[in-house]
Image (tube, rainbow, N blue to C red):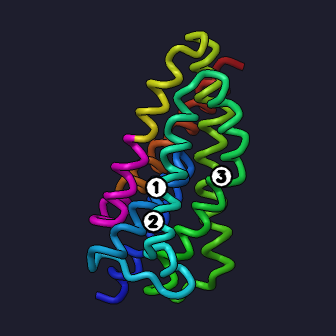
Amino acid sequence: MELLTALSSIFSAFGLSASAGLNAYLPLLIVALAARFTPLINLASPYDVLASWWAIGTLTVLLLIEFFADKIPAVNHVNDVIQTIVRPAAGAILFAASTTVITKMHPAVAIVLGLIVAGAVHAVKAAAVRPAVTATTGGTANPIVSLVEDVIATILSILAVVVPIVIGAVIALATAWLILWLWRRSAREARTS
C-alpha cells in the first residue's frame, strides 16, 4: 500500500507540473483549494502556505490576468515570454509540494523534475504549437487554442489531485506512443534515404 501511495504522489506531481506548463496558476490554485477544503492534499511546510487565504487570493488574481492576457493577440506572445520563467517555477513548486509528504524525495530532485516537465510542456507550446497556429490562422485561432489549453490544464490538474493513477497511466501511454511514433518515423526516413 505504501508503494501505491508513493506512486500516486509521483504521478500526481508529474500531472500537476505538466499542467503548469500550459497554465502556471490553474494547477497552483487547484492544489491550494484542494489543500484548503478537502483531505485530498496535505501540504507540508513550506508548501502549506499555498492553502492560505492570501495565497489563494493572489493566485486567483494572477490566474485572471494570465487568462485574459493569453487571449489577446500580440499580448499573448509577451505573456508567453514572461511565462517562460513562471511556468517552470510553478511546475517545480507543484512537483516538490506533491512529493515531499509521501515519498520523502529530496526537494532538489523534485524541483528539477518539476522544472523539466513544466518547462518542456511550455517549450512545446510556446515554440511549436502557438507559432504554428499564429502562422496558419494569422493569430485568429490563438484565443481558442488558449482556451483549450486552459481546459486541458484544469482537467489534468483535477485528475492529478483526484485520481493520480489515471495520470500515471496516461503518461505511460503517451510515452509509449511517442517512442513508437519516433521509431516508426526513423524507420520511414531510413527507408527513404
Residue type pointed to by label 3? Gly
Secondary structure state at the residue bearing disc 3:
helix
Q: Nearer the viewer, residue 15 or 139?
A: 139
Dot 1 falls on a residue whose secondary structure is: helix
Q: Can you identify the residue that label 3 sits on?
A: 119
Give the Cα separation between the discs numbered 3 and 2.
23 Å
Q: Quick one: SS at disc 2?
A: helix
Say which mark, if any, is on residue 10.
Answer: none
Position of the C terminus, as image quadrant, is: top right
Circles 1 and 2 in contact, beta carbons < 8 Å: yes
Q: Amino acid at mark 1?
A: Thr
Q: Residue at x 58, y 46 (%)?
A: 121
- Numbered-mark total: 3
The residue carrying pointer 1 sits among few (fewer than 14), some (14 to 19) or many (20 or more) residues within 10 Å by Cα, namely: some
**Crowdedness near tag 3: few (<14), some (14–19) or many (≥20) residues, C-alpha within 10 Å:** many
Report the span colored magenta. 151-167
Q: What residue do we see at 48% from left, 86% from top?
A: 44
| Horizontal and vertical percent position of residue 171 | 43, 55
Q: Specify the label residue 60 is tagged with.
A: 1
Q: Nearer the viewer, residue 127 or 170?
A: 127
> Relative to 24, does residue 7 appear above or below in the rendering?
below
Q: Nearer the viewer, mark 3 or mark 2?
A: 2
Q: Residue at x 49, y 73 (%)?
A: 50
Residue 32 in the magenta stretch? The answer is: no
Inter-mark Cα distance, 1 to 3: 22 Å
For marks 1 and 3 on the same chain, the one whose residue lies earlier in the sequence: 1
Q: Amino acid at mark 2?
A: Ile
Q: Which residue is drawn at the image coordinates 45% and 43% (left, top)? A: 177
Q: Position of residue 96 (x, y in %)?
A: 56, 75
Residue tagged by mark 2?
Answer: 56
